[in-house]
Amino acid sequence: MAFETLILDKKEGVALLTMNRPERMNAFNERMEEEFVQALQDIEKDEAVKVLVVTGAGKAFCTGADVARMEGEERRIRGAEEIRRGFKNIQAIILGLHKLEKPTIAMINGPAVGGGFDLACSCDLRIGSEKARFMVAFTRIGLFPGWGGTWLYPRIIGIPKAAEMLFTGDFMEAKDAERYGLLNKLVPAADLEKETMSLARRIADGPPIAIRLAKMQLYKGLGMDLETALKVAAAMETITLTSEDHQEGVRAFREKRKPQYKGK
């Protein structure tokens, strides 16, 4: 699938989706919003893809909405309904990443600002280089973070740090991002792609059914009490106990070889 603002490359069970507007620090315009939604739909349907990696071309990961576009639109006062319609694709992107049944990894090569910060937080895992920086940005221009940040940030970095970033609009540097758990791993810029793709391939080689169910329950379980979560866990383990992948995993363990999972 060819795009104007994105590059989608699929190899060895991993889809690498690159936001490709480096001259605008990979900020979203309407075209990029539409294409990102299309790319997620394509990745969801492609059974050969087991893991999605999202990154940005050039020096930035993503800086949210394109300021040039915003300046042009904000010269007039828009009605509430028109504004809500404008969020349709953004919500589809954030929800699409969050609900995608396949694991997602943000490969953060530079600043992740505003909606770009939220985009990174919508992925399951985040690997960053020392060039990664994070900022809410909305606060600095008098806006509420409309890409889901108030839901996403506290679940990853905790309420106190989320509140500090929301109230001040200050940057969080890469070292602090790792310390607060925002980054799963901090690596040298020269090793970022190698380390991220290595992790992605390891996950892609894993048992698809078990991983898909684990991702689902990681998020749904946040809203469950322990008793309910245990019942769901028992039901999900029952599904995997009866799978061919489980049988293959046991055989491979006994034969001291790498398992060949088929998602059955």
Image (spheres, helix red, strand yellow):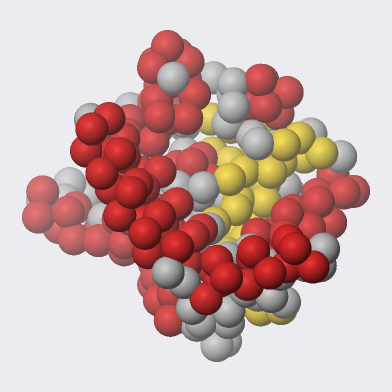
The answer, for residue 79, to whether it is visible in the render is: yes
In the depicted structure, whether residue 239 falls above or below residue 132: below
User: Which residue sits at x=49%, y=24%?
Assistant: 157
Question: In this rendering, would 150 be left or right of 199?
Answer: left
Question: Is 125 drawn above or below residue 91 in the view shown?
Answer: above
Taking 249 as reference, is 118 left or right? left
Instruction: Name the quadrant containing residue 13.
Output: bottom right
Which x, y percent locates residue 54? 60, 59
Quarter location, residue 52: bottom right
* Nearest to the observer: residue 204 or residue 126: 204
Q: In this view, does 210 lie above or below 48?
A: above
Total numbered badges shown on the rendered structure = 0
Q: Residue furthest right?
A: 190
Q: Where is residue 23 in the image (x, y as percent from the top left)?
A: 66, 59
| Residue found 31% across the figure and 62% down from its top | 92
Q: Which residue lies furthest to the bottom in this view?
A: 1
Query: 187 or 248: which is nearer to us?
Result: 248
Q: Can residue 21 be seen in this view?
A: no
Query: Residue 21 location in percent, x, y?
Result: 61, 63
What is the residue that sits farthest to the front in this orientation?
254
Q: Residue at x 42, y 69 (%)?
A: 242
**Image quarter of the N terminus:** bottom right
* Residue 63 locus on image (x, y percent): 54, 46
At a point 67% along the width and 27% down the height, the residue shown is: 178
**Residue placed most toward the observer, 244 or 211:** 244
